[in-house]
Amino acid sequence: MGPRLTGDETALWAAAARVLDANWTGAATVPSPGLYPHQWSWDSAFVGMGLAHHRPDRARTEFQSLFRGQWATGLLPHIVFSSTEPRDAYFPGPELWRSVEQPAAPRGVLTSALAQPPLHALAALRMARASGGADRTFLVPLYPCLVAQHAYLARDRDIGGSGLVSLCHPWESGLDDSPAWDPPLAAVDPRGRTYHGGDQDRYVALVAGMRAAGYRAEYLRDDHPFVVEDPLFNAVYLASTHALAELADLTGADPRPHREAAERIHGALLDRLWDESAGCFRARDLRTGRLIPETTVAGFAPLLDPELPAKIVRALADLLLSARFAGATGYPVPTCDVQSAAFDRGTYSRGPTWVNTNWLLWSGACAHDLGGVADLLFGSTVRLVRQSGFREFYDPFDGSGQGGHDFSWSAALLLDLLAARRSAGRAL
């Protein structure tokens, strides 16, 4: 059962639970019925945190289903394909990835071959806390899988040698069409029409190159054209590395390697991605060596770093509240600087507000005692759901829902927000 709520809280809780129940397949939660019919990696991390307050048994099954797709290298692929859906039910389907041809891929399950922000250790820790410690037996077999996931990222994806993970495809970022990817994508040869033209052809060309090289780390390091250090991915990586240290304590393992890794990631975030002149974090294109001059919601994700210097925390809070982001919109936080030429209020990661990025920034604001920012993010997210339902994303100016309906992580994270507010003893 959910926590005891009153009035509007009860209705929101019940509506979110209905979405998660409807999207449950028996083994996992699809992000949105019909539109996204498989299991996605960081969707499942968000969903697990919500299910922990509603159906903790399903939260555990969600993770077990996802980690069936983990490769022997430790890669946790961003899609685990359903065996009951037609192969053409979603593009890109299994034929693009051809995981069955890869010795390191799991047998009996088809997957993609890209990563996504590694939120899973943090999600597992929050799931355990939500259960009051009852999920510790679940953590024992999960912990080595999480360690292997992080080991893969540190070994095969620290292409710059700095301690940060490099993205090798926009689909790994969680913000697939962010304007931050425009400059590095422009250098990618689309190799002829393969899908819908433009960047979609470049997306496919990137996968084709990786697949032809057997998804080897050497190819990514030496020859792959898209190699970017992203602040959101690495902030999530850092938060989950801190969580791994806590999970190690809970499972009787040694937390010290994770604490040491967190120190390296923290230092590299500041050294490599903080733009002092702009007062924000930016992505770095490793092929040019330069920071990408586009300010997006990803630049606020390092608020998840509990050791972020106070001066930087204040600068990020000021920018977040400014007329370039929350200060300009009725339903923040837009995914792109509204004053940028690239801003588009109706296109995925080029302008709309998303519940999951709001949740990440809310978590970071809470970690740094930014009560006003946290309340703004909480209130904005709840208003979006009240007004437009559990949509994939929302117009940041009028709050209208866009994209998929009955979106699972929007429902799951609403449950997590309500549970946190209840624990704090505060009403909506």
Image (cartoon, rainbow, N blue to C red):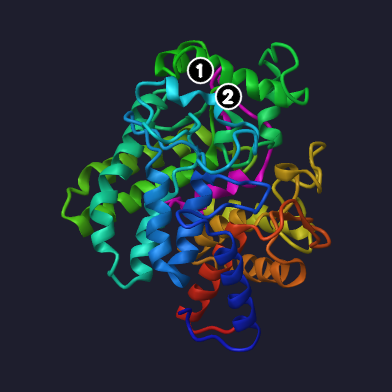
Which structural element holds mark 1? helix
Q: Spatial distance from mark 2 to mark 1, Cα to Cα?
A: 9 Å
- Bounds of the magenta segment: 283-311
Residue drawn at 81 percent across, 43 percent down:
344
Q: Nearer the N terminus, badge 2 or badge 1? A: 2
As drawn, 81 above or below 95: below
Q: Position of residue 392 (x, y in %)?
A: 69, 54
Residue 428 in view here:
no
- SS under mark 2: helix
Judged left or right of residue 155, residue 37 is right
* Circle 2 residues within 10 Å: few <14, some 14–19, many ≥20: some
Q: Residue at x 42, y 27 (%)?
A: 157
The percent coordinates of residue 127 (x first, y second) are 38, 63
Look at mark 1 in the image and give the residue it sits on.
211
Does the magenta portion include 171? Answer: no
In the rendered image, which quarter is residue 73 located in?
A: top left
Q: Is residue 327 left or right of residue 371?
A: right
Task: Tell me residue 117's x, y (percent).
Answer: 49, 42
Q: Nearer the viewer, mark 2 or mark 1?
A: 2
Q: Quadrant of residue 409?
A: bottom right
Are circles 2 and 1 on residues that touch, CB within 8 Å? yes
| Vertical relation: 84 (above or below) 316 | above
Verify whether residue 299 appears in magenta: yes
Q: Nearer the viewer, residue 82 or 392?
A: 82
- Amino acid type of the residue that numbered disc 2 sits on in the rendered structure: Leu
Quadrant into which the C terminus falls:
bottom right
Q: Quadrant of the N terminus?
A: bottom left
User: According to the image, label 2 marks what residue?
Assistant: 96
